[in-house]
Image: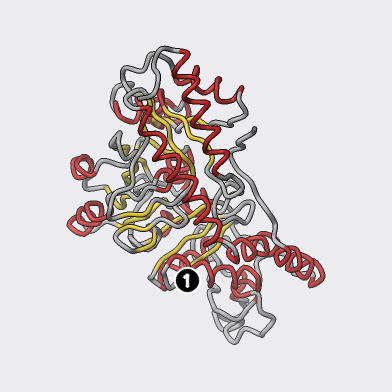
Amino acid sequence: MRIPFGTIAVTPRARRLIDAALDSNRLSSGRLVGAFERRFARLAGVREAVAVSSGTDADTLALAVLHDLGARRGDEVIVPALSFAATGNAVLHAGFTPVFVDVERDTLNIDPARIARAVTRRTRAIMPVHLMGKPANMDAVNRIARKRRLLVVEDAAEAHGALYKGRPAGSLGDLGAFSTYIAHAVTTIEGGVVTTDRRDLAAILRSLRSHGRACKCGVCALNAGQAAPCPRRFRFGKGTDIRFVFERIGYSSKMNELEAAVGLGSLDRCRAVIARRRRNLLAMMRGWRRFAPHLLTFREERHERIGPHAFPILLGPDAPFSRDELGSFLEKNGIETRHLFSSLPTQCPGFRFLGYRKGDFPEAEYVGANGLHVGVHQDLGPEHVAHLLETVERFLSARGAAAR
């Protein structure tokens, strides 16, 4: 039996929309992207959603908004040390300096007790990551942000379907940044979405994703995919066309119509997909208890609902085997694995220039050296969960560490 990490199904409706887009000759961002944005905003419980070309771009553009709010290049953004590389990359791409903070080993998320100590006069934002779909401690993050007048950008890339005290991920800060990559519960194959309740920030985001254009109106094809004439087109200044006036440094980050078509089909079935993935995740969590203390995972607290992105596995401190031994055994038995990311500043060579040293982030470094994750996607069922648990039990028994 195989347990692949991810899966995708392009729905019949998505295929019809793809055909319609091809027939329309409008393939860049247009009507379908607008429809996808409106539906995604409802799902995330916010007023505005701005679709972009990747989850990394979602992070980057959400942070680039800071330039319109008075931030300067080189100012600081606080992020967790443990994350996918896109988190750190986005801070740098947006023109800022990442300030890394260690995580809590049992939640995998940024440690709020360490955030306040990392704030300086140059700090402009905090970007917590809901790693593996588990919400960060947003009450604590927002409390610090309010006190120090900082923007809060949720990296909700993996948090489709997550709730924190009844509110969806992506609605808990000033901005939320989602990935709609192929492995996620809502997918456009490649893509991302920035969510916010602030219409002023949404307007900036729409400008940023299209090279920094001044045109932000809701009728022209550039922003809304409509064919209606723009009443402001030639009113920006004598001899100018507002569509080609660029009022800020921007990016080329639009989602296209074919991706949005896949996304609309994905949204049609996302609640069922999330429910199926959650059943798999919760079954794995229940079955995993018997593997302690050699193998651990996170737990779901009463105030939250974990977004079912993947199932994290962490070796206990006294485990009589290595992460690579476990991973190899799982792979040989048809179970695809991924490392549970790494301490970006000390275990990821690309961030070495920032000057951090091994040992600066002991919790993130432990997870980076001892963590794996496996899929919980919607095409898996009870038989796949049973195969995972039985395989791990055989692995432990062979090493004299039988389950309790």
Mark 1 highlights which residue?
Answer: 42
On screen, residue 142 versus residue 311, left or right, reads left
On screen, residue 26 versus residue 337, left or right, reads right
Query: In the image, what residue occupies the spot 18% across and 40% down?
Result: 117
Q: Residues within 10 Å of mark 1 (few under 14, many from 20)?
A: few
Query: In the image, what residue occupies the spot 29% across and 26% down?
Result: 362
| Scheme of image coloration | secondary structure
> Could you say where residue 354 lies in the image, as x and y percent from the top left?
37, 30
Q: Amino acid at mark 1?
A: Arg
Residue 166, quarter of picture: bottom left
Query: In the image, what residue occupies the spot 50% across and 56% down?
Result: 275
> Could you say where residue 198 lies in the image, as x and y percent from the top left?
38, 71
Indicate the quadrant containing the C terminus: top left, top right, bottom left or bottom right: top left
User: Does 369 appear above or below 255?
Assistant: above
> Could you say where residue 284 lies in the image, as x and y percent from the top left?
45, 39
Q: Secondary structure at mark 1?
A: helix
> Which residue is more in the foreground, 340 or 161?
161
> Which residue is more in the foreground, 229 or 105?
105
Indicate the quadrant containing the N terminus: top left, top right, bottom left or bottom right: top right
> Which residue is more in the foreground, 323 or 241?
323
Residue 192, quarter of picture: bottom right
Query: In the image, what residue occupies the spot 62% across and 68% down?
Result: 33
